[in-house]
Image (tube, coloured by chain):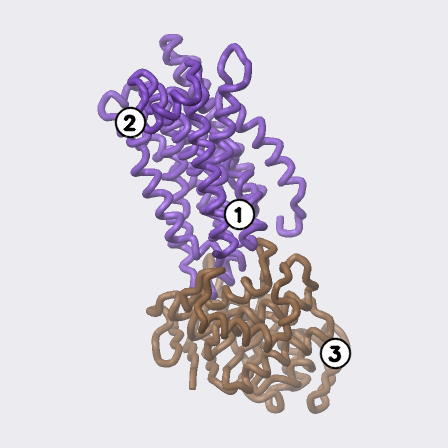
């Protein structure tokens, strides 16, 4: 059972408070969707949670250890992270990109040990990339690349997974495929936190919604409890009709 | 044997063959059998002197300088995630050669022979550090290369100023040697002087090469998979600076060498920046040995400077690689 706890996190950059007094937990078996408008501080909160940003105040701990005190390799073995921007510098082979997910296990590309080869193969198979494994990444479509990035993150075989807009710029089918991968990861005992913008789509996967506005977490609970028309209008400034899990956006307020 | 192992083996054999072949060429005509005898220590002492004190050191210098620049180029390309990064293009070589010239000009070299490599390395480190800091701030590689152009121009201008003020024609010709780059008249002692620095720089780059692979994912994801970004930047910059500085101390500023080899090698190593390092070093060394043979064989009244020939080959290659790039990632 893995667990990540962020307590009263404040992130400040150039005197601007990006995240204010935010507390959030992520545990195995959960699929948390982080919701909020652009500029709400979602990415800053995530970067603090994965240990790439040191909070000005507050503390992040993972399985009882203070994040700040872990070295980058220890941190990466417990938590895999898929950032929003995913530029690939070179047209590497799919298999090599996925193998980079084993970096924290000491992998050198081209000289993988048996245990790493197995983890990479599992990740490739789980993301349905077996046929593409020997292709160069510059020959893949956006949807295929999104699966490669997921496989890279899963290859770490860390108990927790955090992804910043993994479905951005994907067609509806690929959005489902990517989120199905995340759900399988959770069903297999992992814990995932994902930023999404399509609320109705998010209801199909989330076990919990965390709502953010202007750097603060304003609600944290099951989709059923927290999804209301008032919340959508107060957070996004959009008039919406909500009927159960059916959300219809009617226009900007 | 892995593909990479085979590639490296071929390059080692080819380099050794080229260095050996270079011993057959020089201003003193020597028949092949006398060169071979001298090479294996059985010829007359005059022949041995020519081979062991003039030709072999020259060929070895060309190889080491090429290897150093190829290695630095490949490492900087991995760090900056751009195939156009190279010590010459980024102004690192020019800065190193300016610092070296400076120490010659003010006679600091008289204090200790180590002053020359050390000042070249300080010049190179100043430039690489500036570039690394700029790389964190801008993220745009075009900006970075423009900064390199600025550095090169500044070093060139400062060099011209020193030439302008040169007290006598002898120091003037010395400086021209530094600017144009050459491995003529190098001795085994000259090599021994810079070798420790070359080894230290190369070791730093090779030991930290795994991080360059991770950087394929971009800095944010690389940090996510467990790379210590800060340490990687510092060590790659340090390693490339020391290696380039040492090569400049041996041969002056030779530009564009580190750009061709990584480009050729990359498809053979699956575009992995870490696996690019060793074959790039070997191939660059080989290219420079061959170029230096060309310099000596070319029927010109004044011997061509190696740096000039390297730029004549390298600069068009640079332009070609730049044109091949899709500008998607800036």
Instruction: Name the residue beneath numbered marker 2.
Output: B189
Closer to the chain start, of discs 1 and 2, is 1
- Protein chain holding label 2: B
> Which mark is drawn over residue A249?
3
Instruction: Name the residue beneath numbered marker 1.
Output: B138
**Label 3 and label 2 in one chain:** no
Q: Can you say whether A2 is above or below A97 in the image?
A: below
**Is the residue marked by circle 3 packed among few (<14), some (14-19), or many (20+) residues within 10 Å?**
few
Quadrant of residue A121 within the rendered picture:
bottom right
The C terminus of chain A: image quadrant: bottom right
Q: How many labels were placed on the picture?
A: 3
Q: Position of residue A165 (x, y in %)?
A: 61, 70
**Is the residue marked by circle 2 packed among few (<14), some (14-19), or many (20+) residues within 10 Å?**
few
Q: Check disc 1 and report its element: helix, strand or loop.
A: helix
- Protein chain holding label 3: A
Q: Residue at x 72, y 83 (%)?
A: A247
- Protein chain holding label 1: B
**Label 1 and label 3 in one chain:** no
Q: CA distance from mark 3 to mark 2?
A: 78 Å
């Amino acid at each position: 059972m893995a667990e990540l706890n962020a307590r009263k996190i404040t992130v400040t950059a150039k005197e601007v408070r990006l995240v204010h007094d935010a507390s959030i937990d992520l545990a195995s078996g959960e699929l948390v969707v982080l919701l909020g408008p652009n500029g709400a501080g979602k990415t800053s909160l995530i970067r603090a949670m994965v240990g790439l940003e040191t909070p000005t105040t507050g503390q992040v701990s993972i399985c009882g250890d203070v994040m700040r005190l872990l070295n980058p390799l220890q941190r990466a073995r417990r938590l895999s992270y898929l950032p929003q921007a995913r530029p690939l510098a070179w047209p590497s082979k799919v298999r090599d990109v996925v193998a980079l997910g084993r970096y924290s296990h000491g992998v050198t590309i081209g000289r993988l040990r048996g245990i790493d080869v197995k983890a990479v193969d599992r990740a490739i198979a789980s993301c349905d990339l077996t046929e593409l494994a020997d292709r160069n990444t510059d020959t893949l479509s956006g949807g295929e690349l999104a699966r490669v990035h997921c496989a890279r993150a899963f290859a770490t075989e860390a108990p927790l997974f955090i992804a910043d807009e993994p479905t951005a710029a994907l067609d509806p089918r690929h959005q489902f495929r990517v989120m199905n991968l995340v759900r399988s990861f959770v069903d297999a005992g992992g814990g995932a936190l994902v930023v999404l913008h399509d609320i109705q789509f998010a209801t199909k996967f989330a076990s919990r919604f965390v709502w953010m506005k202007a750097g603060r977490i304003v609600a944290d609970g099951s989709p059923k409890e927290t999804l209301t028309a008032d919340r959508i209008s107060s957070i996004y400034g959009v008039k919406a009709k909500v009927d159960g899990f059916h959300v219809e956006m009617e226009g900007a307020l | 044997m892995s593909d990479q192992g085979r590639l490296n083996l071929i390059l080692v054999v080819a380099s050794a063959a080229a260095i050996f072949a270079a011993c057959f060429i020089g201003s003193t005509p020597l028949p092949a059998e006398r060169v071979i005898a001298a090479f294996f220590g059985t010829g007359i002492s005059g022949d041995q002197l020519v081979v062991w004190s003039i030709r072999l050191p020259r060929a070895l210098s060309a190889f080491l300088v090429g290897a150093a620049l190829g290695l630095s180029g490949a490492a900087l390309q991995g760090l900056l995630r751009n195939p156009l990064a190279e010590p010459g293009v980024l102004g690192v070589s020019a800065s190193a050669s300016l610092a070296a010239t400076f120490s010659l000009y003010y006679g600091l070299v008289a204090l200790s022979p180590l002053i020359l490599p050390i000042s070249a390395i300080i010049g190179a480190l100043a430039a690489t550090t500036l570039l690394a800091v700029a790389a964190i701030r801008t993220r745009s590689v075009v900006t970075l290369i423009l900064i390199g152009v600025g550095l090169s121009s500044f070093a060139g201008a400062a060099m011209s100023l020193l030439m302008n003020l040169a007290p006598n024609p002898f120091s003037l010709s010395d400086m021209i040697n530094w600017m144009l780059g050459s491995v003529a008249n190098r001795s085994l002692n000259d090599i021994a002087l810079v070798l420790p620095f070359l080894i230290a720089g190369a070791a730093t780059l090779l030991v930290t090469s795994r991080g360059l692979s991770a950087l394929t994912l971009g800095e944010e994801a690389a940090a996510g998979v467990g790379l210590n970004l800060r340490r990687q930047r510092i060590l790659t910059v340090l390693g490339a600076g020391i290696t380039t500085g040492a090569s400049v101390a041996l041969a002056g500023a030779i530009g564009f060498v580190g750009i061709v080899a990584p480009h050729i090698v990359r498809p053979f190593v699956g575009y992995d920046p870490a696996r690019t390092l060793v074959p790039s070093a070997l191939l660059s060394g080989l290219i420079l040995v061959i170029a230096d043979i060309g310099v000596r064989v070319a029927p010109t009244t004044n011997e061509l400077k190696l740096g000039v020939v390297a730029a004549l080959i390298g600069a068009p290659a640079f332009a070609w690689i730049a044109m091949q790039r899709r500008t998607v990632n800036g």
